[in-house]
Amino acid sequence: MIGINFKRTLSFIFILAFLCPLTSCFDIIDEITLNADGSGEITLTANLSKSKTKLASIMLLDTVNGYKVPAREDINHALNKAVTFLQNTEGISNVSKKVDFDNYIFSLSCHFRSVNNIDDILQEVTKNLKVKPLLFSYNFDATKKVFSKNYSYDTEVKTEYEKLKEDDKKVFDEASYTSIFRFEHEITASSNAKAKISKSKRAVMMRASALDVINGNINLTNKIQLK
Amino acid sequence: MKYLLLICALFSFTFNQAQDLREHIPYNATFVGSIDGSKILESVTISELDNSKLGKEMLKAFSKESGQELSSIEDIGINTNATTYFYFEKNDSLSYTVLLVPLKEPQFLEQAFIHDKAKIMQNNNYKYVQADNNSYVAWDNNKMVFVIGYSNDEYFTDYDFSTIETELKEVSEESAEGQVSEVEEVMEATEQPEQELTYDDLPYLYNYSLHLYASNYYYFSEDLKQAAKNNNSDFLEQLEEQVEQLKGYIAEIDSISNPDPENLDNFISNRAYFLKQAALSFEDPSDREYAQKLIDEATYYSDSFKVYESPYNYDDTSYLDHYDEKRVLESKWTAYMLHKTMVPAQKSIMKNKQYTAQFDSKAVINIWNSHLGNTMSEIYSGMYNALQGYPKSLDEMMGGYGEFSANLYLEGPEARISVDMELSDEFADIYQRMGNQKINSNFFKYLNEDKLLGYMSYNVNFKNTLEEYPRLLAKTYGPLMEGKMQDEIAIGADLFSLLLDEEAVAKLIKGDALLAFTGINEKEVTYTDYEYDEDYNYTAVEKTKTEKLPDFILMASTEEMSLTKNIIAYLVKKQLVEAENGYYKIKDKKSELPLEVYFAIKNDIFFLTTSASDISDIINDRYTAKLSGKHKKVIKQGNFSAFFNGKRFGEAFPVETNMPNKKIAEYAVKNASDFYLKSSKIKNKTMHGELIMEVPANHKSTISYLLDFIEHID
């Protein structure tokens, strides 16, 4: 009896102290390493570590701001489902996931035979979504050695974002998106001025704030010419 | 909605008592509540209410709904010299809630109903309207009565509906007379169907012979149409046989019931229409005539049979539930209660000593329940009935809880809610044994009032609780199992006692505990970020930032040193905890708390805290304690207490610039007030508890604070 009340009381205090400011930071990192034959590795990481005290507090609750708070088992289950889905997808192998609830970092990675396999996954994952936040498609022309990421902005994203309550919008205030591409060959040109080429000329990185992505203020399309 | 709004307003702003409406409340009302407006007016004036955001919005809504321009809440016509009451009562057939509002003058109310085009009826010296099927409003010059009633389903088991059925039938026949032409129109409209029905459209007819007839009629009509199309008159003779077969099916049918008649007519009339059209294709007039004869002989409608009313309603596949009859009865019974309430009760609640004894004229709001156990049983029984039949031994269930009384007092700078709950002899004994423990006064040595944000204390005799708790659960929930599990629950309770050595456990956990919140302090927290090299390879690095986090300390009395020592040694060995200068740091935090947690045992007290400095000071006898007699008294007094220092919390609370609802948060922390929750030991078989809220210094009273708070909500 005491134990239950103790936990409830602590939850209450933590809610008071943290929940009102729901401005959590999170980073999404999308990393692709492309081999010369068009195969490669992709890793998608969500790092919510900067908000870990807030998240740990939120996880003590069932719902917050009217949304159900997923339990650890729910998150694990969702990731396991994603892994199973990827394992059964044509051209995808070596699927792995990392779950770190101490720091709230989650990642999924896999090997693909061709970048088109990623397109297939994206299409499959987003086909039932009303709003498609990240409309990407990838292409690699091995003969011309051109890798391209095509991004089309869906205005619905902004419309849906505008529909959110002011409090909920704040979740995106300090969130960011990072995209890194690595190649075996050197890069001779990158079409997007916002993308930076590494010193070794074998990697390209592009960072954007979540708000810029939502509002369509940034174009994530890039065409990379390899040597 | 309109009525609801009106009722809310009337209920919220009724003042003082000249006329005692309690005379209208029956002696055996289960729940009785009252609100004394004069107490509200002691701390706020009518004009302050009128000019508050809440008052303005109410006046605006009322003016709009009633079609009358209102400038003051007083214009509503409420008697400012009386108290408003509500009560709940249940008899065998009806559960009903009544609101009794004193009126100064009824014009506003009457005009509001006229504006709403409600049918106002007169009965003796009062008027009334039916607000909804099961709710009525009546008023005279002194009072308004609102009644809402719900019939009790169990009352309708074996209920004889014949009288009300006859009554409803007569009413429907009267109204049906005016609708005949409409029905004829519909019939005519179906004479020329747009599309011919196919075999797929053949309805399922519950009478099997009728179904065979309809399906064979389909084949008969198809054959005849084919013959007409080919002008094959020879085939007509062969169809005679089919007609005889159809007649055979019809002969087998004595009577049919709904929904067969309608379904049959719809299908046959459609098929017959197209069949007759097709028959015109025969070139020879005699063939046409012959075909027509066959069709006439083969075609039967529902009027060929005796039709009786089926007890089953196939439309919603449920047993005919007398829904309409029940609603009519519910309405009648509610109206009866309305008329009954308009005159004083033969024996009123004023003669109920139990009620009058707890009623305190100093309270602003009073809520009373004659027997919580019985009321809970009724609620549970209702719930249980819906699930699976009638439960047994319900009277035992929750029977340990008796009369319940709650009073709200507005006493100068504080608002106080006082709650009393009566217990049965057995429950009083159980709770008394469970509560037979004094709180460890050594806890006070480790509290500093200057830093305290709040606390909660529990004070139970753990040994007695371990012994009594299973018994309490068995008593409370055993009957819910319909008596089936009662033995098992009792055995379970015994097993629980057998397995536990209460004495030994009670040494480890004595049963008194105090949880204190000692501040919101800046703490360094780590997080993982990435550092990218020049080739954008990234490595995870641990970074730190400061966050304001709450600190707490939990203290619990313990005695069993050898056992605890062994447990701690084990935890250290398993590297679950780490020894640090006389105290321990929990390493494997499965607790999900986003904080470092430390613990120690000293002076027979187990300490658990988030503050390393506090626990270090405690271990090294350096802790500076400060606690006033007021708090000590509150903690010692009963078995449970709580305190929340709103003002200090307001000072310590980190209102971030970009936080949502910043305005309200700022107001809340600026105007936060202190809360106390107090309890007393069981006296005269009654549990007593109090919640006290102190009004912030910048507000003159609880009501003005409340109005000001509403003012700040968007």
Image: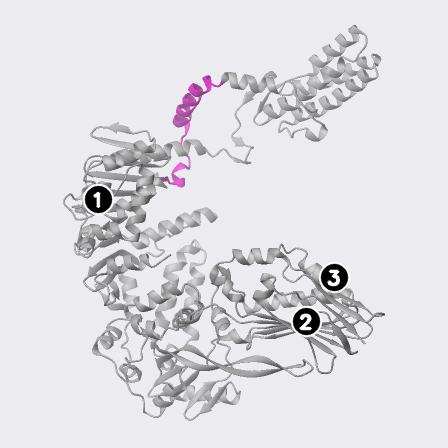
Q: Secondary structure at mark 2?
A: loop
User: Are the residues under marks 1 and 2 on the same chain?
Assistant: no
Give residue A120's mark. Answer: 3
Work out whether A30 lies above or below B533: above
Residue to which mark 1 is pinned: B74
Residue mark closest to the camera, 1 vs 2: 2
User: Are the residues under marks 2 and 3 on the same chain?
Assistant: yes
Measure the C-alpha gap from mark 2 to mark 3. Answer: 28 Å
Q: Residue B190: where, in percent of width, then height?
A: 62, 20
Give residue A193's mark. Answer: 2
**Per the image, is B641 magenta?**
no
Q: Is residue B168 left or right of residue B335?
A: right
Residue sticking out furthest to the right: A143
**Per the image, is B172 magenta?**
yes
The residue sitting at 68% across, 21% down in the picture is: B249
Q: Residue B478: where, in percent of width, then height?
A: 40, 59
The residue sitting at 32% across, 92% down in the picture is: B621
Residue sticking out furthest to the top: B286
Q: Nearer the viewer, residue B165 or B646?
A: B646
Measure the C-alpha gap from mark 1 to mark 2. Answer: 71 Å
Chain for disc number 1: B
Give residue B187's mark. Answer: none
Q: Residue B4: where, in percent of width, then height?
A: 34, 43
Three-letter amino acid code at the position of disc 3: Asp
Residue B185 shows in this picture: yes
Residue sticking out furthest to the left: B18
Res B610 → quadrant:
bottom left
